[in-house]
Each structure stands twice: as C-alpha cells, then as structure tokens.
Image: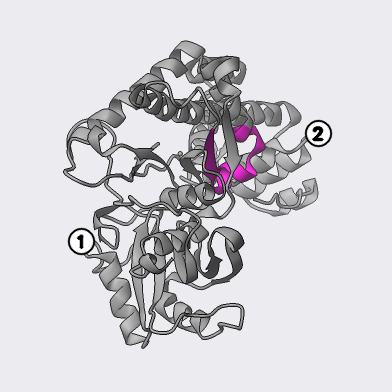
Amino acid sequence: MSSVTVSAAAPSAVGSFISRSRQRRRRLTMALRSDAVSVGPTKMLTKLKHECATPLPLLQQVAHAMSVEMRAGLADDGGPGLPMIPTYVDNLPTGNEKGLFYALDLGGTNFRVLRVQLGGKDQRVIATEFDQELFDFIALGLARFAAKEDDRFHLSPGRKREIGFTFSFPVKQTSIDSGILIKWTKGFAVSGTAGRDVVACLNEAMERQGLDMRVSALVNDTVGTLAGAEYWDNDVMVAVILGTGTNACYVEQISAIPKLNGHVSSSGKMVSQRGEIVRRVLQKMAEEGGLFGKSVPQKLSMPFILGTPDLCAMQQDNSGDLQAVGSLLYDKAGVESNLSARKTVLEVCDTIVKRGGSLAGAGIVGILQKMEEDSKGLIFGKRTVVAIDGGLYENYPQYRGYLLDSVKELLGIEKSNNVVIEHSKDGSGIGAALLAASNSMYKQDF
C-alpha cells in the first residue's frame, strides 16, 4: 500500500456599520477615476461571469487534465505534471495499535500538540488531549505538554515516547521519519531551515529540552487526515485539505509510480487567495465602471486587504439593505457603497467562489477517475469516502455547496451515490499520532 498527495486552493467577522456622520469625520484618501468610462459595472459583471463560468465540458476537461498531470508527476521529478513528492507512508493504521503516542501538528494557522492512548481493536482511542503553543516554542511546548500526563495515559516500561509530526509545508521525504524542507510557504520564514531535515531539527530541539522522544512518522496534513479518517472508516480512499493551502492525498499502488523503486506518495501545495481576486475585480470595476461613484479609495488598491473570510462574511448577509456588506467594505477597503453596489459586490464574490468550488470538485473527481482506471472499476462500484478538512471547506457554506454540486454533476447520479464526501475536522493531528503508532518501533508487540 502507498499514498500520494497532490496539489490543487480560506473563511471573519464583520465590523460595525459606520454612521454617515462618522464617515464625514473619518478622512479617507481618495483617487478620482477618469470620466471616460466606456463600460458600466453591469456589463463588466456580465463579462466576469462569462469568463469565470464552469460549464460541464470545462469541468470534465479539468478532471481529465488532473488525472493526466498526476500520472506525469508520478513518472518523473522536476518534469511536467503535478508535483508528487513521496510521503513513504506504506502502513496505515489497522486498529490494532496500542500504547501512548504523541503528535505535533504544524499548519498554516496553528501549532498543536496532542497525545492519544490507543487500546487496540476493542477499545480503539481510549483518551486524547490537546494543547497549543507558538511555532517558536515547539520543543518547549511539547516538553510542557508531556509533563502534564495524568493517569489516563501510561507508557509501557522500556519504551520511548513516539511522535507523529504533521508538517504542512513542501518537504522531500527520504523515509517515513525524515524529510528535507524544500521551502516555507503560507507566510512562514524561518532562516537556516530550508534544505535541512525537519525531523533532525525537531530532534535537536527536543534534545536541548531533555526530552526522551523520537519522531516515528513525518506526514503531510492530508496524509494525517487520511489516516485519521480511515482509522474509523475503511472506505476512506482520498483526503483533501481546503484551507490556508490546498492539497490532496490518496492511496496509490507502487507499480503506478515509475519514479520510485520501492516506496510511494507525494505532496504539493498551491495557495489561491479568493479575497485578493475579488479585490482586483472590484478595483477594476471602480476605476473603469464607476461601481462606487467618481471617487475610488486608494485603500482599495492595496493587495490582500480582503481575505476569503471577508467574502464568506459578506455572503452570509441576508438583510434587505446588506448592511453587513456595506460595513465590511468600508472597514476593509474604505469604500462607501449604496445598495446597488453592494449587490454587485455579492455577485462578484459568488462568481469567484462558485468557480473555485467547482474546480476543486473537478480536481477531486480527477483523482477518483484515475483511481477508478487503475483499479479497473473498483472505486465507483462501491462506497468510497473522501475526507475533507480545512477552514475554507468547513466555514464557507457557498463554497462547500458548489464543490458538492460539481462532484455530483461530473459523476452523475448513479456514481455520485457511492461517493461520500465527509468533513474530517482536525483529523491531521490525531492521524499523525495514529501513523506514529502504525510505524512504531514496537509495533510487533501490538
């Protein structure tokens, strides 16, 4: 058995609405748009919808291309195709695992430490406990957390504590317990670590803290999610993360990976900021279509002032005057808007989010279709579960709906009835602990 992760795509609160009198007191830097407006916002919106549309033939093309690019990525490093970096996970949890195991979960938003007591087939997960610390204090946070073990957790005599390390950044793995950091993403930048073995870095930090622990599994967040979900449901075949970053993981046969001579898997990431896409569209519509009147706030030209959580918050506004939309536009971008402009903004948000959700669904179908072809019909003919985690999928109902609609449209009623898409909340952390167990140096004792 072997697993591969593949690349492919994040959801805040709305500030209070600002009164007209306060608006007058608050000075905003404005830019006058040209009076030579040739296209109004309505025509620009129609053009945007047309260019962002995802009709069925396009989604079918994306799903097929996903499958083709996956095969190309499995064949050769550095060549055409998706980046498919081996994870070397060839032992998923079986349920027989017993003992105390730890996990570190370092993602784009949080760093968490957790422990789990496993009791084998009959008892499964006996107890779990979580804690959170800053990235700069990983080893110190782990030492503090380990010192708080109570009588629910017990280490068998003569054993070391073992850790599953979820590291959600591009790594070139050389074994299940080692991996070279390719580069930092998601806004992280830690000097002196790129090109180094992240497990060795962690082991050195633990030694400085006097911790007698070892990393027995280095995994990507999707691999952890797959392991955590598959532990409870043997029909789980694919895991997807849709959050700060986006990637996917599935179980692959070693024979289907020409570039490897014995192991498997992969991981790649690509971040797509929907908020920034919407900001650029609104800026263009303001400057060339007069969306917000003759004056265009210069703040609107600042990159990344709108995030995906802002789009989500606006799309949840069901009030008649779209007051929350107006408030958020003013607080975030310095935009004063009337009801017509707010409605246009919502349509822009929905257009971008629909395209993103639909394409994500097509990517999932592309993975499933490849697995179906390789297994000669064993995927769509039975119950197949896709486990998804990440803030974008969890917190953005419109995005989630478009993704599900896309999967159903592409597969058709009969096949889609066998494909179950489940939310696997926080699965990557406990999945890492389970992989530490399934790759334990003591697994012969289970």
Determine which residue is flagged by label 1: 195
Question: Residue at 26% of width from left, 71% of height from top?
Answer: 200
Looking at the picture, does residue 16 appear above or below residue 177? above
Question: Residue at 51% of width from left, 53% of height from top?
Answer: 228
Is 262 a magenta residue?
A: no
- Specify the quadrant of the image occupied by residue 401: top right
Question: Residue at 51% of width from left, 28% of height from top?
Answer: 361
Q: Is residue 41 visible?
A: yes
Secondary structure beneath dot 2 equals loop
Determine which residue is flagged by label 2: 321
Question: Residue at 37% of width from left, 26% of height from top?
Answer: 375
Q: Which one is nearer the viewer's eye here, 84 or 293? A: 84
Q: Residue furthest top?
A: 57
Earlier in the chain: of badge 1 and badge 2, it is 1
Q: Is residue 73 left or right of residue 313?
A: left
Q: Is residue 68 left or right of residue 28?
A: left
Whole-percent x, y for residue 338 in the image: 73, 32
Looking at the picture, does residue 41 appear above or below residue 325? above
The color scheme shown is: one colour
Start and end of the magenta stretch? 384-400
